[in-house]
Amino acid sequence: MSFKIDHIGHVVKDFDKAMDLYQKKMGLKPNKIMEFAEFGGSKMAFFPFGGLEMEVVQPGGKGADPAARCLKERGEGVFHLSLRVDDYEGTIKEWRNKGFTIGEYTHKTPGHIARIAFLDPEELMGLWIEFIKEEQL
């Protein structure tokens, strides 16, 4: 199994306020900004920060959105640690074989697909871990 830290997620209630914080106060410029209809319009922005990326997420609040669950249970703050994997299927199989519950999601944008899996934080003493594999279409 091979993976590396990809980004850290920051869940927020107000995307525009968070964008103001990251851009104006912190002086950062986003690498990408996205919105996903699948969870009721979740908004995301990725900022380079300290050799990693910070992902700002405002949940759309619809369906089984892990970010909405985190925001509801904990409020704003660190959401997850994201690990980029080379072998998505093998990684998921390995962690399921270890006894972990995993929720899988797919985010699609034109020319791009991200396969995402979250380990259940209740099984990790509150830690949210995301495995991600991105591909260009």
Image (cartoon, rainbow, N blue to C red):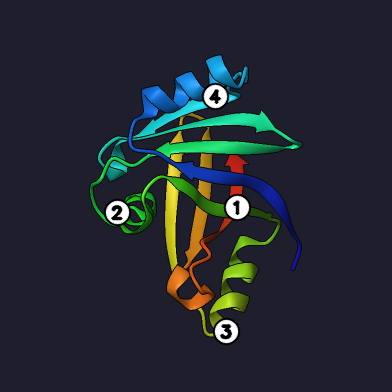
Q: Earlier in the sequence, mark 2 or mark 1?
A: 2
Q: Earlier in the sequence, mark 3 or mark 2?
A: 2
Q: Which residue is mark 2?
A: 72
Question: Residue at coordinates 60% horizontally, 42% vertically from top-left?
Answer: 135
Residue 120 visible in the current orientation:
no
Looking at the rendered structure, which numbered label has been put on residue 82? 1
Q: Is residue 48 positioned above or below 135 on the image? A: above
Q: Nearer the viewer, mark 2 or mark 1?
A: 2
Q: Earlier in the sequence, mark 3 or mark 1?
A: 1
Q: Nearer the viewer, mark 3 or mark 1?
A: 1
Q: Which residue is mark 3?
A: 97
Residue 68 image offset from top left, x and y in percent: 32, 50
Residue 72 image offset from top left, x and y in percent: 29, 54
Residue 61 image offset from top left, x and y in percent: 25, 45
Which amino acid type corresponds to the residue marked 2 in the rendered image?
Answer: Lys
Which amino acid type corresponds to the residue marked 4 in the rendered image?
Answer: Tyr
Considering the image in quadrants, where does the N terminus appear? bottom right
Q: Rounded to the nearest whole Å, what is the CA distance between mark 3 and mark 2?
A: 29 Å
Considering the image in quadrants, where does the C terminus appear? top right
Q: Secondary structure at mark 4?
A: helix
Q: Secondary structure at mark 3?
A: helix
Q: Are marks 3 and 1 in contact (CB under 8 Å)?
A: no
Q: Is residue 73 positioned above or below 91 on the image? A: above
Q: Earlier in the sequence, mark 2 or mark 4?
A: 4
Using a 10 Å C-alpha cutoff, classify the residue at mark 4 as few (fewer than 14 neighbours), some (14 to 19) or many (20 or more).
some
Q: Is residue 60 positioned above or below 106 on the image? A: above
Using a 10 Å C-alpha cutoff, classify the residue at mark 1 as few (fewer than 14 neighbours), some (14 to 19) or many (20 or more).
many
Q: Earlier in the sequence, mark 4 or mark 1?
A: 4
Residue 7 image offset from top left, x and y in percent: 63, 44
